[in-house]
Amino acid sequence: MHEAPVNERNRPAPWLARRDCPEGNQARRSGSGARSHGGGPNGSHLVYGYSNTSGCCPISFGRGTYVRPATNSAANPIDTSSQTSPSLFGSRIISLEDSSSPRFINVQDADAGNPYTTDFSTWLDTTPVGLDVEGVDVAADGRLAAIGFETWNGGTQTLGKIAVLAIQGVDQMPTFPAAVDCFLPAAGIARDASLAQDAGAIAWKDDGGVKVAGSPTTAADPCVMGSVPVVLSPTGTHPSIGGADAAAFLPAPPVTPPPPPPSPAVPSPGAPGGTAPRVPVMTIPARLTAKALAARRGVRVKVKVSGPGKVAVTGTVPARRLGRRGKPVVVARGKGVARAAGTLTIRLRLTTVGRKRVRRLKGARLTLRVVQGSRSSRKVVRLR
């Protein structure tokens, strides 16, 4: 983490009506508390920052962190005073000092009574950065921390940055130089960082919306992300990466009625057995050459037909192959008459144009089209 200019913060905070605030009937949630919250590793507890005032008279003021079970219990939450902007690391609270310009990050001492205990120790002093701390999120595996920094002036946030730092859990201070120590390459004001449980990805909010990217793995600054940032929502706020199954909270998809059964086929008049006639199918030699097509007897092409009638085969090549422009040019023809359904042999020969340009046809793509009445099929071959 690196130095940055310091500005005085004067953050606005909206008044919110809350019914579960023991200190009074109204609560003002602090700016940092607006995002500070967390659930235990199994979702059994909630921690969240508060800023409360009592009614008159006298008026009292207090702020800190509330902890309560994630149930509909009517019991008041437990107050861990002097801690703000909480998040959870396992069952331990990670928080900021109670200050208008917080610089110290605290961690709840290890205890069987966590997260309800009130003993905290300083984990990281961010004073050298020169900015106020906005919040912190620690990956569940204890290998990476994301720390939000900010500056406010006259009720307007003027700066927001997110530092990513490699750590060794929360029972010891991070060692420097750290393997990862950089600021995210955000657009404008960045805040509300959230790390995946395995530290493999990070989400945040900046002027471009809610984004997610692969976590950095080096100390290069700005951070070199593990993958290109993706905008999840240009208008979203307060991202949080977790292991919840979002599908479980969605309404069941509408039941799609089964499609109607297909209509029975209408027999075509004149087709044998009353079935619809099929398109003619060509079978051509495996190696078709321009020289063979130019011969007097041509090349024998077998055509399978589903009924009697005249059958014609034409072969075309692109006009540019013959030094021309426009539509494809017919260079081969053949025809015959089928007496009944079955296989008909047709001799395919070059046309006059084809014979004059036989040398140019070598290597050309020949499109063969067979037609019987209104039915036709195509094949494309390379002339050798």
Image: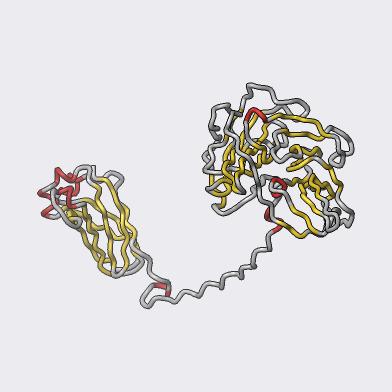
268 left or right of 59 in image: left
85 shown above or below 122: below
Q: Nearer the viewer, residue 235 or 85?
A: 85
Q: Residue furthest front?
A: 58
Q: Quadrant of the N terminus?
A: top right
In which image quadrant can residue 24 be found? bottom right
Q: Nearer the viewer, residue 305 or 190?
A: 190
206 left or right of 63 in image: left
In which image quadrant can residue 135 be found? top right
Position of residue 193 measured from the top left corner of the image (x, y, whole percent): 64, 42
Position of residue 306 measured from the top left corner of the image (x, y, whole percent): 36, 66
Residue at x-position 33% and y-position 62%:
280
Q: Quadrant of the C terminus?
A: top left
Position of residue 40 measured from the top left corner of the image (x, y, whole percent): 79, 44
Q: Nearer the viewer, residue 83 or 375?
A: 83
Residue at x-position 67% and y-position 34%:
145
Residue at x-position 55% and y-position 49%:
209
Give the colour scheme of this rendering.
secondary structure
191 left or right of 119 in image: left
Position of residue 342 measured from the top left corner of the image (x, y, whole percent): 35, 63
